[in-house]
Image: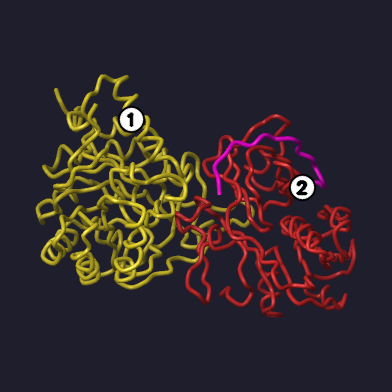
């Protein structure tokens, strides 16, 4: 983890609300599932975003412009700078997994991109299930297709199977020895109930982002754990929803 | 140039102390810098039994600060003494302040007593002002009679000097300060957070699960400064000032108002290096303001 200043290389709109932000700077090696905390001028707290990609001193952040801070970020231009904490938290555990299933709900697919790349580097082509509200919310489909076998679902059926992520998993008859899920809490809860053989990436409103304020502590079978410090990735069998 | 100050019989190398609840048990920050530069550390609020605290969300952003409703999450007094102090001792060589919370007088007394044999603790900070616990917490800090009784009982049981952390959520904070001084408190620290709330515009529901929480950050600095000034005038015991301190200039201003030392809280959450940076810039700011010794400026705003 490191406090640093990052420079905007590009900030591209992918769909009506989703943006791809590429930042460069002094960035230590990133493990998939780790996140960055970005400062936005005029806002008191930094904002946590999972790191979608990391290559050659650059990180990619995929974000949805829904609040005041992220709408401000949507206006960032090449050359703008932001103070950031990078490489925060414990990432995904890819060890001893030969048949991974990556499950992304909405903007939650972001950290799975770097995870898929890590599996590729291990010689594994992962199954990737991407669930969106509708076709307009979808992004990075071709990028994911370059890394694995992509299965799609939307709540209204405008893209792929009509249904939620868990229904789609059953419909596509996807098998796995471990799944890696990131998305809305109800989706993560449903997956944790469906199978304990998984890892969940959680999000939370955070104060500091580095373990000091206890603002993001969740209950686990091993006691309280901080999403920013012991997480954001947790074992599906340890989280108490 | 002399940055040292005295607090409750202990000499601090400088007056900057990370405030309770914003610095964990200290060792997390040793990942960022050598925390031995700190004057002291006020540890995360500790209760007799372990507490998880309030459900999430516990944080809501505000202009110039944030609301928190953590709810005194901590591993319980015994574990703090046996494990957390030991972990901190590996990265910090100076003495610290144990912050004690509770929901009944007995809790406070027993928790404070747990630290009697902890050599690294030079003072107890009694948290009678936490707005985020249902029973106790702030309740002890809003009624002068109850606060005084609590302080008397803790003083009987504790072998350490007792500092009382006061709530700003009262009509007249000097009433509370005078009451705890009369009951034997060795110092007061102020202010704790101001009770506030935010509502999510999309759901029309309070953002915090606890509905309201404590507001802190640079937005509260002028309120804190005014209260430190008033309390300094009202009592003879040392006053430790806190509330929205972000810079070395704020430290000087708070000491002018009457603070014998200061606590820096929310600044740590937005910049993990905040305390180190403030301490590093103090000599330059002292030079700029023609200050040679920080001890000499305590309460200067009260002179003529």
Q: Main secondary structure of the magenta part?
A: strand
Query: Which is more foreground, mark 2 or mark 1?
Result: 1
Q: Position of residue A231 (x, y in %)?
A: 58, 62
Magenta residues, as a range? A1-19
Query: Tag 1: Cα neighbours inside 10 Å, few (<14), some, or many (≥20)?
Result: many
Q: Is residue B165 left or right of residue B268?
A: left
Q: Which residue is mark 1?
A: B282
Residue lying at 65% horizontally and 37% vertically, measured from the top left: A25
Q: Secondary structure at mark 1?
A: helix
Q: Is residue B253 above or below residue A193?
A: above
What colour-coding does the image apply?
by chain
Query: Tag 2: Cα neighbours inside 10 Å, few (<14), some, or many (≥20)?
Result: some
Subunit of label 2: A
Q: Position of residue A201 (x, y in %)?
A: 65, 64
As drawn, the chain in red is A
Q: Position of residue B194 (x, y in %)?
A: 37, 48
Q: Is residue A17 left or right of residue B265?
A: right
Subunit of label 1: B
Q: Quadrant of residue B228?
A: top left
Residue A42 is marked as none
Q: Position of residue A16 (x, y in %)?
A: 80, 46
Residue toward you, A218 or B97? B97
Q: Quadrant of residue A196?
A: bottom right
The span from disc 2 to disc 1 (Cα, nearest Å) is 45 Å
Q: Secondary structure at mark 2?
A: loop
Q: Which residue is mark 2?
A: A17
Q: Quadrant of residue B240?
A: top left
Residue lying at 23% horizontally and 42% vertically, measured from the top left: B12
Q: Is residue B299 above or below residue A12?
A: above
Confirm whether residue A194 shows in the render.
yes
As drawn, the chain in yellow is B
Confirm whether residue A155 shows in the render.
no
């Amino acid at each position: 983890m490191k406090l640093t200043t990052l420079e905007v290389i590009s900030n591209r709109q992918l769909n009506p609300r989703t943006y791809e932000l590429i930042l460069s700077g002094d960035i230590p090696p990133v493990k998939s599932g780790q996140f960055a905390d970005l400062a936005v001028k005029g806002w008191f707290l930094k904002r946590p975003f999972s790191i979608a990609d990391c290559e050659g001193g650059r990180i990619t952040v995929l974000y949805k412009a829904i609040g005041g801070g992220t709408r401000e970020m949507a206006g960032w231009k090449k050359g703008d700078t932001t103070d950031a904490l990078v490489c925060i938290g414990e990432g995904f555990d890819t060890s001893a997994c030969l048949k991974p299933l990556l499950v992304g709900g909405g903007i939650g697919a972001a950290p799975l991109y770097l995870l898929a790349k890590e599996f590729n580097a291990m010689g594994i082509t992962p199954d990737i299930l991407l669930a969106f509200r509708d076709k307009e919310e979808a992004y990075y489909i071709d990028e994911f297709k370059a890394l694995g076998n992509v299965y799609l679902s939307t709540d209204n059926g405008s893209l792929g199977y009509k249904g939620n992520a868990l229904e789609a998993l059953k419909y596509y008859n996807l098998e796995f020895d471990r799944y890696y899920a990131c998305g809305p809490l109800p989706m993560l809860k449903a997956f944790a109930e469906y199978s304990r053989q998984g890892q969940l990436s959680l999000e939370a409103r955070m104060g500091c982002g580095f373990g000091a304020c206890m603002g993001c502590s969740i209950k686990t079978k091993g006691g309280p754990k901080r999403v920013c410090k012991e997480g954001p990735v947790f074992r599906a069998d340890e989280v108490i929803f | 140039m002399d940055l040292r100050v005295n607090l409750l019989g202990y000499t601090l190398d400088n007056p900057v102390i990370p405030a309770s609840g914003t610095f964990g048990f200290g060792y997390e920050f040793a990942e960022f810098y050598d925390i031995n530069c700190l004057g002291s550390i006020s540890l995360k609020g500790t209760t007799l039994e372990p507490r998880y605290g309030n459900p999430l969300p516990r944080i809501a952003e505000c202009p110039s600060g944030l609301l928190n409703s953590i709810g005194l999450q901590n591993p319980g007094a015994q574990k703090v003494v046996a494990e957390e102090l030991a972990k901190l001792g590996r990265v910090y060589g100076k003495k610290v302040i144990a912050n004690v919370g509770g929901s009944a007088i007995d809790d406070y007394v027993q928790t404070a007593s747990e630290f009697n044999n902890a050599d690294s603790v030079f003072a107890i900070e009694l948290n009678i002002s936490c707005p985020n616990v249902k029973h106790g917490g702030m309740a002890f800090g809003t009624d002068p009679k109850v606060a005084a009784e609590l302080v008397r009982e803790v003083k009987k049981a504790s072998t350490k000097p007792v500092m009382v952390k006061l709530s700003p959520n009262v009509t007249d904070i000097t009433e509370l300060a005078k009451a705890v001084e009369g009951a034997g408190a060795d110092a007061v620290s102020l202010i704790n957070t101001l009770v506030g709330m935010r509502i999510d515009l999309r759901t029309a529901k309070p953002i915090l699960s606890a509905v309201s929480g404590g507001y802190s950050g640079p937005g509260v600095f002028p309120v804190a400064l005014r209260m430190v000034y008033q309390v300094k005038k009202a009592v003879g015991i040392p006053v430790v000032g806190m509330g929205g301190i972000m810079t070395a200039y704020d430290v000087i201003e708070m000491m002018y108002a009457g603070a014998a030392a200061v606590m820096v809280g929310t600044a740590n959450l937005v910049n993990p290096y905040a305390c180190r940076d403030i301490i590093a810039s103090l000599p330059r700011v002292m030079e700029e303001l023609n200050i040679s010794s920080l001890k000499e400026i305590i309460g200067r705003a009260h002179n003529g």
